[in-house]
Amino acid sequence: MCELMGLSFAEPVAAKFLIHEFATRDVENADGWGLAWYPDHSLALVKEELTWRKSDYSQFLEGYQRIKAQIYLAHVRHKSTGGEPTHADTHPFGREYAGRDYCFAHNGTLPEFQKLPLGRFMPIGGTDSERIFCFLLDAIALGQRGMDVETDWRWLHGTLAELNQQGTLNCLLSDGRRLFGYRDVTGWKGLALRKIRFHGQEERHFEDATMEIAVAGDSTNHGSVLATRPLSNTGWHELKLGELVVLERGRLAFSSHGAS
Protein backbone atom coordinates (compact mmCIF):
# COMPACT_ATOMS: atom_id res chain seq x y z
CA MET A 1 0.00 0.00 0.00
CA CYS A 2 0.96 3.66 -0.17
CA GLU A 3 3.50 5.23 2.14
CA LEU A 4 3.78 8.83 3.30
CA MET A 5 6.66 10.86 4.62
CA GLY A 6 6.88 14.51 5.64
CA LEU A 7 9.70 16.63 7.03
CA SER A 8 9.56 19.94 8.85
CA PHE A 9 12.77 21.70 9.97
CA ALA A 10 13.61 25.03 11.55
CA GLU A 11 16.21 25.68 8.84
CA PRO A 12 16.51 24.21 5.33
CA VAL A 13 18.05 20.74 5.07
CA ALA A 14 19.19 18.68 2.10
CA ALA A 15 16.62 16.16 0.98
CA LYS A 16 18.54 13.21 -0.28
CA PHE A 17 19.59 11.83 3.09
CA LEU A 18 16.06 10.63 3.74
CA ILE A 19 14.06 10.67 0.53
CA HIS A 20 16.28 8.16 -1.25
CA GLU A 21 16.15 5.66 1.60
CA PHE A 22 12.39 6.03 2.07
CA ALA A 23 11.82 5.34 -1.61
CA THR A 24 13.57 1.96 -1.49
CA ARG A 25 10.29 0.70 -0.13
CA ASP A 26 8.67 1.17 -3.55
CA VAL A 27 8.81 -2.61 -4.16
CA GLU A 28 5.56 -2.64 -2.22
CA ASN A 29 4.34 0.54 -3.92
CA ALA A 30 5.05 0.16 -7.62
CA ASP A 31 2.45 2.52 -9.13
CA GLY A 32 4.26 5.82 -8.74
CA TRP A 33 6.31 8.12 -6.54
CA GLY A 34 6.40 11.82 -5.84
CA LEU A 35 8.51 14.33 -3.99
CA ALA A 36 7.42 17.87 -3.14
CA TRP A 37 9.41 20.56 -1.37
CA TYR A 38 9.35 24.29 -0.74
CA PRO A 39 12.58 26.01 -1.85
CA ASP A 40 10.97 29.22 -0.54
CA HIS A 41 7.25 30.01 -0.35
CA SER A 42 6.61 28.30 -3.70
CA LEU A 43 6.15 24.57 -4.28
CA ALA A 44 8.49 22.36 -6.30
CA LEU A 45 7.06 18.99 -7.31
CA VAL A 46 8.45 15.98 -9.15
CA LYS A 47 6.43 12.80 -9.63
CA GLU A 48 6.14 9.84 -11.98
CA GLU A 49 3.86 6.87 -12.51
CA LEU A 50 6.88 4.55 -12.18
CA THR A 51 8.82 2.94 -9.37
CA TRP A 52 11.66 5.04 -7.95
CA ARG A 53 14.31 2.61 -9.17
CA LYS A 54 13.14 2.83 -12.80
CA SER A 55 13.10 6.62 -12.88
CA ASP A 56 15.71 8.87 -14.47
CA TYR A 57 14.35 11.67 -12.29
CA SER A 58 15.26 9.78 -9.13
CA GLN A 59 18.81 9.19 -10.33
CA PHE A 60 19.15 12.92 -10.89
CA LEU A 61 17.70 13.79 -7.48
CA GLU A 62 20.00 11.36 -5.70
CA GLY A 63 23.05 13.18 -7.01
CA TYR A 64 21.74 16.74 -6.98
CA GLN A 65 23.13 18.71 -4.04
CA ARG A 66 21.18 21.95 -4.28
CA ILE A 67 17.72 20.83 -3.13
CA LYS A 68 17.17 22.32 0.31
CA ALA A 69 13.95 23.15 2.10
CA GLN A 70 12.30 23.32 5.49
CA ILE A 71 9.29 21.25 4.38
CA TYR A 72 9.18 18.08 2.27
CA LEU A 73 6.38 15.67 1.35
CA ALA A 74 7.02 12.27 -0.24
CA HIS A 75 4.72 9.50 -1.39
CA VAL A 76 5.05 6.07 -2.98
CA ARG A 77 1.85 4.65 -4.39
CA HIS A 78 0.01 1.38 -4.64
CA LYS A 79 -3.18 2.41 -6.41
CA SER A 80 -6.52 1.46 -4.93
CA THR A 81 -8.72 3.46 -7.33
CA GLY A 82 -8.56 4.30 -11.01
CA GLY A 83 -7.16 2.38 -13.99
CA GLU A 84 -3.58 2.21 -15.20
CA PRO A 85 -1.15 4.47 -13.27
CA THR A 86 -0.95 8.01 -14.67
CA HIS A 87 0.99 11.15 -13.84
CA ALA A 88 -2.29 12.90 -13.01
CA ASP A 89 -3.12 10.32 -10.37
CA THR A 90 0.33 10.31 -8.78
CA HIS A 91 0.85 12.03 -5.41
CA PRO A 92 1.56 14.59 -4.08
CA PHE A 93 -0.94 17.05 -5.57
CA GLY A 94 -0.45 20.81 -5.63
CA ARG A 95 -2.83 23.78 -5.90
CA GLU A 96 -2.58 27.52 -5.23
CA TYR A 97 -5.04 29.31 -2.97
CA ALA A 98 -4.82 32.89 -1.64
CA GLY A 99 -1.20 33.26 -2.64
CA ARG A 100 -0.03 30.00 -1.04
CA ASP A 101 0.96 26.75 -2.71
CA TYR A 102 -0.82 23.87 -1.00
CA CYS A 103 0.39 20.29 -1.27
CA PHE A 104 -1.39 17.05 -0.31
CA ALA A 105 -0.70 13.31 -0.19
CA HIS A 106 -2.96 10.54 1.12
CA ASN A 107 -3.15 6.84 1.68
CA GLY A 108 -6.37 5.00 2.25
CA THR A 109 -9.64 4.59 0.39
CA LEU A 110 -12.94 6.47 0.49
CA PRO A 111 -15.28 4.18 -1.50
CA GLU A 112 -17.89 6.87 -2.21
CA PHE A 113 -15.45 9.73 -2.81
CA GLN A 114 -17.25 10.88 -5.95
CA LYS A 115 -20.08 12.14 -3.76
CA LEU A 116 -17.81 14.78 -2.20
CA PRO A 117 -19.09 18.19 -3.40
CA LEU A 118 -16.68 20.39 -5.35
CA GLY A 119 -16.52 24.09 -6.21
CA ARG A 120 -13.68 26.08 -7.71
CA PHE A 121 -11.06 23.34 -7.21
CA MET A 122 -11.45 20.43 -9.60
CA PRO A 123 -9.50 17.15 -9.89
CA ILE A 124 -7.35 16.50 -12.94
CA GLY A 125 -7.11 12.75 -12.34
CA GLY A 126 -9.55 10.19 -11.04
CA THR A 127 -8.37 9.32 -7.54
CA ASP A 128 -10.20 9.68 -4.25
CA SER A 129 -7.05 11.38 -2.91
CA GLU A 130 -7.12 14.30 -5.33
CA ARG A 131 -10.85 14.78 -4.85
CA ILE A 132 -10.34 14.90 -1.07
CA PHE A 133 -7.68 17.57 -1.60
CA CYS A 134 -9.98 19.64 -3.82
CA PHE A 135 -12.82 19.24 -1.32
CA LEU A 136 -10.59 20.47 1.52
CA LEU A 137 -9.36 23.48 -0.46
CA ASP A 138 -12.93 24.40 -1.39
CA ALA A 139 -13.87 24.26 2.30
CA ILE A 140 -10.83 26.37 3.26
CA ALA A 141 -11.75 28.95 0.61
CA LEU A 142 -15.44 28.96 1.55
CA GLY A 143 -14.56 29.62 5.17
CA GLN A 144 -11.85 32.12 4.19
CA ARG A 145 -9.49 30.26 6.46
CA GLY A 146 -5.86 31.31 6.59
CA MET A 147 -4.84 28.07 8.36
CA ASP A 148 -2.64 30.14 10.67
CA VAL A 149 -4.50 29.80 13.97
CA GLU A 150 -5.67 27.02 16.25
CA THR A 151 -9.35 27.51 15.44
CA ASP A 152 -8.59 26.69 11.81
CA TRP A 153 -6.51 23.67 12.82
CA ARG A 154 -9.35 22.37 14.98
CA TRP A 155 -11.73 22.90 12.07
CA LEU A 156 -9.37 20.90 9.83
CA HIS A 157 -9.26 18.10 12.37
CA GLY A 158 -13.06 17.98 12.52
CA THR A 159 -13.34 17.97 8.73
CA LEU A 160 -10.80 15.16 8.33
CA ALA A 161 -12.52 13.17 11.09
CA GLU A 162 -15.82 13.44 9.21
CA LEU A 163 -14.15 12.30 5.98
CA ASN A 164 -12.54 9.45 7.89
CA GLN A 165 -16.01 8.10 8.69
CA GLN A 166 -16.38 7.31 4.98
CA GLY A 167 -13.28 5.09 4.75
CA THR A 168 -9.59 4.93 5.60
CA LEU A 169 -7.60 8.15 5.73
CA ASN A 170 -3.99 8.99 6.53
CA CYS A 171 -2.76 12.22 4.97
CA LEU A 172 -0.19 15.00 4.86
CA LEU A 173 -1.01 18.60 3.93
CA SER A 174 1.18 21.69 3.71
CA ASP A 175 0.62 25.34 2.91
CA GLY A 176 4.34 26.06 2.68
CA ARG A 177 4.48 27.32 6.24
CA ARG A 178 3.32 24.30 8.19
CA LEU A 179 3.04 20.55 7.79
CA PHE A 180 -0.23 18.92 8.85
CA GLY A 181 -0.41 15.18 9.49
CA TYR A 182 -3.57 13.15 10.21
CA ARG A 183 -3.77 9.48 11.30
CA ASP A 184 -6.67 7.21 10.44
CA VAL A 185 -9.11 6.77 13.32
CA THR A 186 -9.20 2.97 12.97
CA GLY A 187 -5.42 2.64 13.07
CA TRP A 188 -5.24 1.48 9.46
CA LYS A 189 -1.59 1.46 8.44
CA GLY A 190 -0.07 4.17 10.65
CA LEU A 191 1.62 7.52 11.06
CA ALA A 192 4.57 8.04 13.39
CA LEU A 193 6.46 11.14 14.53
CA ARG A 194 10.19 11.46 15.24
CA LYS A 195 11.72 14.64 16.66
CA ILE A 196 15.33 15.40 15.71
CA ARG A 197 17.62 17.69 17.69
CA PHE A 198 21.27 18.36 17.09
CA HIS A 199 23.80 19.02 19.84
CA GLY A 200 26.65 21.05 18.43
CA GLN A 201 28.02 19.72 15.15
CA GLU A 202 26.97 16.11 14.80
CA GLU A 203 25.66 13.46 12.47
CA ARG A 204 22.59 11.49 13.46
CA HIS A 205 22.02 7.96 12.18
CA PHE A 206 18.74 6.10 11.78
CA GLU A 207 18.27 2.64 10.36
CA ASP A 208 16.00 -0.35 10.17
CA ALA A 209 16.08 -3.58 8.19
CA THR A 210 15.82 -1.79 4.86
CA MET A 211 17.60 1.52 5.26
CA GLU A 212 20.27 3.63 6.89
CA ILE A 213 19.97 7.39 7.25
CA ALA A 214 22.57 9.96 8.25
CA VAL A 215 21.44 13.48 9.14
CA ALA A 216 24.14 16.10 9.54
CA GLY A 217 23.38 19.35 11.31
CA ASP A 218 24.22 21.69 14.14
CA SER A 219 22.58 23.08 17.22
CA THR A 220 20.89 25.89 15.26
CA ASN A 221 18.65 23.39 13.50
CA HIS A 222 16.05 20.89 14.62
CA GLY A 223 13.08 19.20 13.04
CA SER A 224 10.45 16.51 12.94
CA VAL A 225 9.72 13.63 10.59
CA LEU A 226 6.34 12.02 9.95
CA ALA A 227 6.30 8.59 8.30
CA THR A 228 3.84 5.78 7.75
CA ARG A 229 6.28 3.41 9.45
CA PRO A 230 9.16 4.29 11.80
CA LEU A 231 12.53 4.63 10.08
CA SER A 232 14.49 3.46 13.12
CA ASN A 233 13.98 1.36 16.23
CA THR A 234 13.82 4.16 18.76
CA GLY A 235 12.56 7.71 19.16
CA TRP A 236 9.33 7.32 17.20
CA HIS A 237 5.87 7.94 18.61
CA GLU A 238 2.76 6.68 16.86
CA LEU A 239 0.14 9.38 16.48
CA LYS A 240 -3.02 8.61 18.37
CA LEU A 241 -5.99 7.28 16.44
CA GLY A 242 -7.71 10.16 14.68
CA GLU A 243 -5.01 12.66 15.72
CA LEU A 244 -4.04 15.75 13.74
CA VAL A 245 -0.62 17.30 14.35
CA VAL A 246 0.68 20.61 13.05
CA LEU A 247 4.43 21.02 12.60
CA GLU A 248 5.86 24.51 12.24
CA ARG A 249 9.58 25.15 11.70
CA GLY A 250 10.38 21.71 13.01
CA ARG A 251 8.39 21.84 16.23
CA LEU A 252 5.00 20.51 17.26
CA ALA A 253 2.73 23.57 17.19
CA PHE A 254 -0.55 21.74 17.77
CA SER A 255 -2.05 18.34 18.47
CA SER A 256 -5.77 17.63 18.45
CA HIS A 257 -5.18 15.03 21.18
CA GLY A 258 -2.64 16.90 23.29
CA ALA A 259 1.15 16.56 23.05
CA SER A 260 2.40 13.61 20.96
Image (cartoon, rainbow, N blue to C red):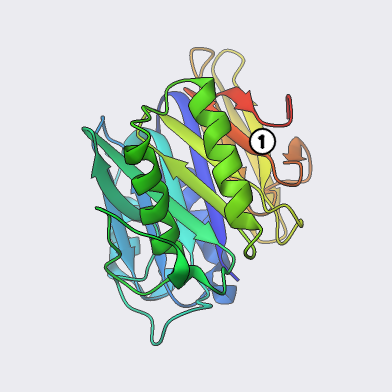
| Local secondary structure at mark 1 | strand
Residue to which mark 1 is pinned: 194
- The image position of residue 21, as x and y in percent, is 53, 55
Q: Is residue 186 above or below residue 225?
A: below
Q: Is residue 131 left or right of residue 67?
A: right
Crowding around mark 1 (Cα neighbors within 10 Å: few <14, some 14 to 19, many 20+) is some
Q: Is residue 245 above or below residue 49?
A: above
Residue toward you, 177 or 224: 177
Residue toward you, 257 or 172: 257
Please report the residue visible at 61 percent of the width from the left and 34 percent of the height from the top. 245
Q: Is residue 104 visible?
A: yes
- The image position of residue 209, as x and y in percent, is 72, 60
Q: Is residue 160 above or below residue 108?
A: above
Q: Is residue 111 left or right of residue 50?
A: right
Please report the residue visible at 54 percent of the width from the left and 21 percent of the height from the top. 150
Residue toward you, 242 or 213: 242
Please report the residue visible at 53 percent of the width from the left and 78 percent of the height from the top. 80
- The image position of residue 51, as x and y in percent, is 43, 74
| Quadrant containing the C terminus in the rendered view | top right
Residue toward you, 143 or 37: 143
Return the residue found at the far bottom.
83
Q: Is residue 250 visible?
A: no
Q: Is residue 13 above or below residue 231?
A: above
- The image position of residue 79, as x and y in percent, is 50, 77
Please report the residue visible at 54 percent of the width from the left and 51 percent of the height from the top. 171
The amino acid type found where label 1 is placed reads Arg
| Quadrant containing the N terminus in the rendered view | bottom right
